[in-house]
Structure formats: C-alpha cells, structure tokens
Image (spheres, helix red, strand yellow):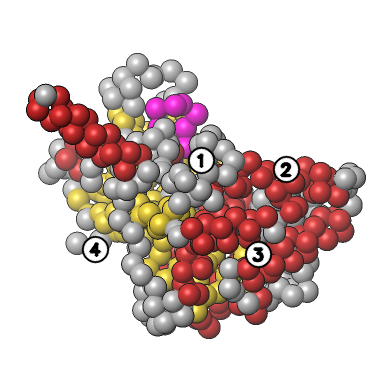
Amino acid sequence: MQKKNFLAAVFLFVTLLFTAAAQGGEFPSIEPFSQADRVLILAPHPDDEDIGCGGVIQRAVKSGAQVKIAYLTNGDHNEFAFIVYKKWLVLRNSEFIAMGKVREEEAKKAMKMLGVDERNLIFLGYPDYGTDTMFFSSWEKNAPFKDILTRQSYVPYKEAPSFGAPYKSENILSDLKRALLEYKPNKIFVSHPADVNGDHWAYYCFLQIALQDLKKEFPEPKVYAYFVHTPGWPSPRHYHPDLELIPSEKDFPDGLINWFSFKLTKEEIENKYKAMLCYRSQTCVSAFYLLAFVRGNELFGDYPVISLKRQDSGVTKTAELFNSDKRVSYAVADDSLWVRVRKPPEVKDRLFFRFYFFGYNDGVPYSKMPNIRVRTKKDKVTVEELALKKTLEPAGTTALLRGSYFILKVPLKLLGNPDFILTCVVTDKTFLPLDSAGFRKLKILDH
C-alpha cells in the first residue's frame, strides 16, 4: 500500500512538473514595473500592442510608469478583412487610407480601455506590408517605396509626425530616433526578429540601428521582443484564458532564445480580451486567431548578442573557429565573416540558401552601408546589393559544401567593415527551424 502511495505521489509530481513546463512555468518573469519606468511599446500594426503586450501595458500603467506606444503602420493593407468589415469590395486607394484611419481609431479606443491616453499614441503611418522591403532597399539611393494597394509613396496620415514624408527607410529611422530621444525609455517592447511577418522583424531591425545611433544620448534600455506570427501558433485557437502561451517546439527547438513569461491577473486577462474586441475591423474575420493570444501570460524573448573575435584560419582548425555547434554558427577569420550551417548529410542536391547581411559601422551613416544578400546553390554564389538593386562580383565570397556542413565566407569589406551585423539565413528545406533563421546580432570584436 505504501509503495502504491509512493508511486502515486511520484506520478502526481511528474505530472505537475510537466504541466508547469507545458504552461511556460520554467521561464522567468520580466522584472516588476515602477513609477520610475518609461515604457515604450513598438507595434508594427494597430492590435499588435494588445496581442503582445496588453497585460504589460496594464501592469505598467497601474504601477505608475509612463507608457507610450508607437505604431509603425496603420495596418491599411488587410484587404480581405476590410471587405468583410465594409461588406463591399474595397478597391480605391482612398478606401484603404480610410481603413487605416479606422484602425487608428480602434487603437485609441482599445488603449483607453487599458489606461493609455491617446496623447501617448504615435502613428508613424508607414506602409503596411511594405516596411521589410523598405528596410532592404528603400534607402536614399532609391526612389520611395510605393504601396500596391494604397498607391501611396508618402505618409498619407495628417496626424503622423512626418506627414508627407517619402516612404524611405531613413525617414522611419529618423521618426523612431526622434521618439526615442524625446522619451528616453528604459524598457522597450518590440516585435520579434524571428517573426515571419516582414513588418514585425523590420521594426526590430530599425530599432537596433536607432539604438546604436543613439548609444551616447541616453542609457541603454532593456529590450523585450514579443512573438506573434508563425503558421499554426498559438494552438489551440480561440479564447482560452486558462491556458498559457509557450514557444512552438517545432519552430523553437534549440533553446537559442532567452524567454520570459509574464503572468496576467484575471482582471488583466479580461481587460485584454475587451481591448481586442475593439478591433472590429480585424476580429470580424480573425477573432479565432486574435483571441488565442488572450491567455494567462505574455511571452517575450530575444537572441543574445553573439560576440566574435578576429581569428586566423591558418593557425586554427576550421571546426574550432565557430562560436558554437548549433544549426547555424559564426566566426570572423581572415577579415571575413564565416557562416556555417549544419545539415543532414543526405541533403546535397537542390540545396538553396539566402543569407542577409546588414552591417553597421559607427563611422558611416547607415543609409550608406551596403545591404547584402548572398544566394547560394550548392557551392555557387550570387552576391546582390539590395539597396542598389544590382548584382556584384563575388569578391572573395565563397561557399563550401562539406559532409554535414555548408560554409559561407564573406569578406568584411564587402559588408562595409561593420562593427556589428544583423544577419539571417533562409532555406526552403525543413531542417532549419525558425529559431535558427531569425535575425541575429553579431558583434565584431577588435581583438
């Protein structure tokens, strides 16, 4: 009998342990808010601030902290949702701008419910479904980005800080830096660098550039990244306030990200739910998805910065150059950046990669830095300057396929001799999960 009771107790303990793990109980929480905090929420679209940070916003406001929210776009590109909402075909460019205003008003109503006055909301007005393309190529060297639905190439919202400004990336960067300088936040919540929605990872990348430009202007803030978009997540769909958000095992299997779980009270969950319903233009078609984020916690996490010292491949074995043996690892040797991708040995034919390299040099305005994409097919490479929209000579860029590894070598000179690099790798194969393909920050050490 005692043995049975002991086994039952062990079984109960293990069950509770795995239940806690499944609910995200193993992740630490973000630190408490106080009156001294100046919190900045960066939302790519109206509703992302509630999806990712509805509980955080309430807790910060209740703690007496200052809270501001900066929306990158007005979300004026969601054609299907607009048709359902309006109950007629939305075709004219002016109608899309009008829907952007609808989403702005929805955000004001939702955030008022969470305790944020509309005077603390900033709508930058840049193109929904276009800021990733802008980050690639719409810098001063090129014509402004043109949205295919609104047909706009300029910020069309009169309330925007830069109304009439061309859709150029340096204007996004300028607006973001102005907001950072005026507010000087000590805590920033931003969309995730591994998010598959282009506006989401682009906002993160713009923030990294802006913070580096302003590193001498105010103390470095803490940055928390919230994750929204990947197929099939979160699961189950619909409203489940009794469940918690946990990272998808399919997309984040390798523990590369330092996650934080922020637990919500019942009142915070209920208020977040009510705020989400304020977005009628979106919930009319996506309530089952949007309400799936209203749970017992909010999830935040980011990659740690990878610091790479300069090495000499002539005196160090190739296998020992790299910073880790993860699926994707990095090294700096022979004045080049080396990227190694671990792959199944049987994957040899039709092996394609796209590598993106956005370098930052303290002595060069970012708009003048090269934006490099390297496409590979086996050991063949194509080098493209995205901002200039031209193909370059490989100039020492090489690819090597060796057993279980693919190794790419790119001269640092080609990348503008950067101090740090924002980089990601994309493949059409399934062996590289999402957490290995998000944008990482590589810091190049002098010694």
Residue 292 badge: none
Q: Residues within 10 Å of mark 4 (few under 14, many from 20)?
A: few
Distance of label 4 from label 2 (alpha carbons): 52 Å
Spatial distance from mark 1 to mark 3, Cα to Cα?
22 Å
Q: Nearer the viewer, residue 23 or 119?
A: 23
In screen coordinates, is 278 left or right of 344? right
Q: Label 4 to label 3, Cα distance in Å?
A: 48 Å
Mark 2 vs mark 1, CA separation in Å: 17 Å
Between the C-alphas of marks 1 and 4, the distance is: 42 Å
- Could you tell which of marks 1 and 4 lies nearer the N-terminus? 1
| Residue visible at 78% across and 64% down in the picture | 101
How far across and down, in percent of the image, does residue 143 sit?
Answer: 71, 59
Mark 2 nearby-residue class (10 Å; few <14, some 14–19, many ≥20): some
In the rendered structure, which segment of residues is drawn in magenta? 425-433
Q: What label does residue 110 carry, if any?
A: 3
* Viewer-proximal residue among 50 and 132: 50
Please identify the quarter of the rendering in which residue 274 is found: bottom right
What secondary structure is marked by label 4? loop
Give the total of numbered labels: 4
Up/down of 193 relative to 63, above or below: above
Position of residue 310 in the picture relative to residue 389 (left or right): left
Mark closest to the chain's N terminus, 2 or 1: 1
Which of the numbered marks, if any, corresponds to residue 234? 1
The residue that label 2 is drawn on is 285
Position of the N terminus by quadrant: top left
Q: Amino acid at mark 1?
A: Pro
Of circles 4 and 2, which is in front? 2
| Residue at numbered disc 4 | 446
Task: Decide which of tag 4 and tag 2 comes sooner along the chain.
Answer: 2
Crowding at mark 3 (Cα within 10 Å: few <14, some 14-19, many 20+): many
